[in-house]
Image: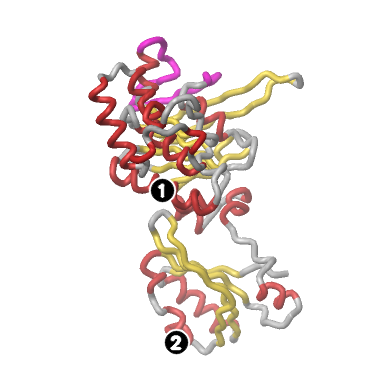
Amino acid sequence: MLEIKNLSKSYKTKQGPLLALNDVSVKVNKGDIFGFIGLSGAGKTSLARCISVLEKADAGEILLNGVDITRLKGARLRQARRKMGLVFQHFNLLMNATVFDNVAFPLRIAGKSKAEIRARVTELLEVVGLTEKETVYPATLSGGQKQRVGIARALAAEPELVICDEATSALDPDTTRQILALLRKIAADTGVTFIVITHEMDVIKALCSHVAVMEGGEIIEQGKVIDVLTAPKTDTARRFFAKDYSSEGWYKAVQERKLGHHIFRALFIGESARRSFIHDVIRKFDIELSILSGSIESVSGTMVGSLILEITGDEPVLADAMEYFRINGVEIEPVDHT
């Protein structure tokens, strides 16, 4: 659907050229919700602006359904842009236009008839839950409502690809959850492909099917979210995906040597998250096992349970217990508490 090949982009500064994107390559399949995560300056927004052709890349290709949009001009470029919708961090609404007119704006540019515009806008306002707001102006709306208008506008021309650039960064946690739920539903109902630019790991876990980790203008790791979450290969990915245990009560007790020294983190993924596995391990092996901490969450629609375990026993028996975890689909690793 979307394939980026060897994309590079630099900006002129007083200190000389600033390389924002360096030989970026990635493939996004139809129906994916593909997240790009990284710290400020990683190149995420530059990538989004190049994909949407708001900026021109210095080198490389951006293939949308096999067509390199970096080479298009005039009417062909405008036609390609209509296949993409944009959702911005700060909404970018027309403040002197009603909600209806904001959503209708791309349809009017595309030359749709009044009847077509009325039908499409009415449909979209129902989708985003703003049917009763069509005649009001953005200044009277909450942040979440403004972003719903932005989402409806991005979908107005029935795009094949929607780019969300930090779409929830300006919202409070409750509103963020509502917007993410709305985007998930839209993706499921329409099959539209989403690119999500964010620095928030919770957004990636709650919304995305795939993720690329960016650093210094490069993609340093990519794959399915569940795979990168459970087995990150780079230090940057580990910083984003790994949990910081330093504030946990059990961690402090370990530091004070009030607990044993065999502390493990066990990940139960998918069906293994629903099994009473701990009871089986205790019954099968001559070990003592205590659960110090635990959580369960949905990651890209897959249940992931995480347990911090204190396990004591003879080394050979402990090794057998660890192997039993692994052959039963449970990922287990020592927790560094030194």
Residue drawn 67% across the image and 74% down it: 249
Which image quadrant: the C terminus?
bottom right
According to the image, label 2 marks what residue? 284
In the image, residue 283 above or below residue 11? below
Magenta stretch encompasses residue 151: no
Where in the figure is residue 66, as x and y percent of width and height? Answer: 34, 25
Q: Does dot 1 land on a helix, a strand or a loop?
A: loop
Q: Which mark is residue 56?
A: none
Q: Is residue 306 left or right of residue 190?
A: right
Categorize mark 2 by other alpha carbons within 10 Å: few (<14), some (14-19), many (20+). Answer: few
Q: Comparing marks 2 and 1, which lies closer to the viewer?
A: 1
Relative placement, left or right, of 325 versus 116 is right
User: Which percent across, then down, holds residue 128?
Assistant: 36, 42
At horizontal 34% and vertical 48% (from top left) the residue drawn is 185
195 or 157, nearer to the observer:
157
Q: Amino acid at mark 1?
A: Ser
The relative height of residue 230 versus residue 267 in the rendered view (above or below) is: above
Q: Is residue 57 magenta?
A: yes
Check residue 209 in the rendering and tell me which mark sits there, or answer none. 1
Q: Is residue 52 visible?
A: yes
| Colouring used for the render | secondary structure
Q: Please provide the residue range marked out in magenta.
A: 55-75
Residue 224 appears anywhere in the view: no
